[in-house]
Image (cartoon, grey):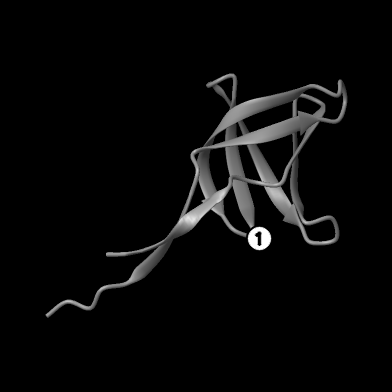
Amino acid sequence: MQKKEYQDHYESICEVRCTDNGRTMEVDVSHFKPKDLCKILVEGKIEVYLRYNSKHDEYVGSKAGMEFITKGPEYMGSFKY
């Protein structure tokens, strides 16, 4: 008999703010590891890696000279498989 495990689930979108122009946008999250990494797709095609900053409890990254900040995707719950 296979043991069932719990797995945390997060939304596939999150809100990101560009610190250079102040613009806030909703982006797709392609990969997420809590308190480590948040990989997003800006406008559905530009891939940006954001690393966790524990001092500010947010994810920060840059692409093409622009800095992006997010709190990450919303936690949906833990489910048993």
Is 7 placed left or right of 58 in the picture?
left
Q: Is residue 52 above or below residue 16?
A: below
x and y, in percent, of residue 72 in the image: 64, 46
x and y, in percent, of residue 37 in the image: 62, 52
Q: Is residue 58 above or below residue 42?
A: below
Is 11 placed left or right of 63 in the picture?
left
Residue 13: name its quadrant: top right
Q: Is residue 59 above or below residue 81?
A: above
x and y, in percent, of residue 26 in the image: 63, 27
For the residue pair 25 and 77, the one nearer the viewer reads as 77
Quadrant in which the N terminus appears: bottom left
Q: Amino acid at mark 1?
A: Lys
* The furthest residue to the front: 77
Is 24 placed left or right of 13 in the picture?
right
- Which element carries disc 1, helix, strand or loop? loop
Residue drawn where x is 71% and y is 33% of the image: 16
Residue drawn where x is 27% and y is 64% of the image: 81
Residue 35: name its quadrant: bottom right
Q: Is residue 70 above or below residue 34?
A: above
* The furthest residue to the left: 1
Q: Which residue is mark 1?
A: 35
Estimate how packed mark 1 is, as few (under 14), some (14 to 19) or many (20 or more) residues with alpha carbons within 10 Å. some
Residue 61: name its quadrant: top right
Residue drawn where x is 51% and y is 45% of the image: 31
x and y, in percent, of residue 7 in the image: 40, 64
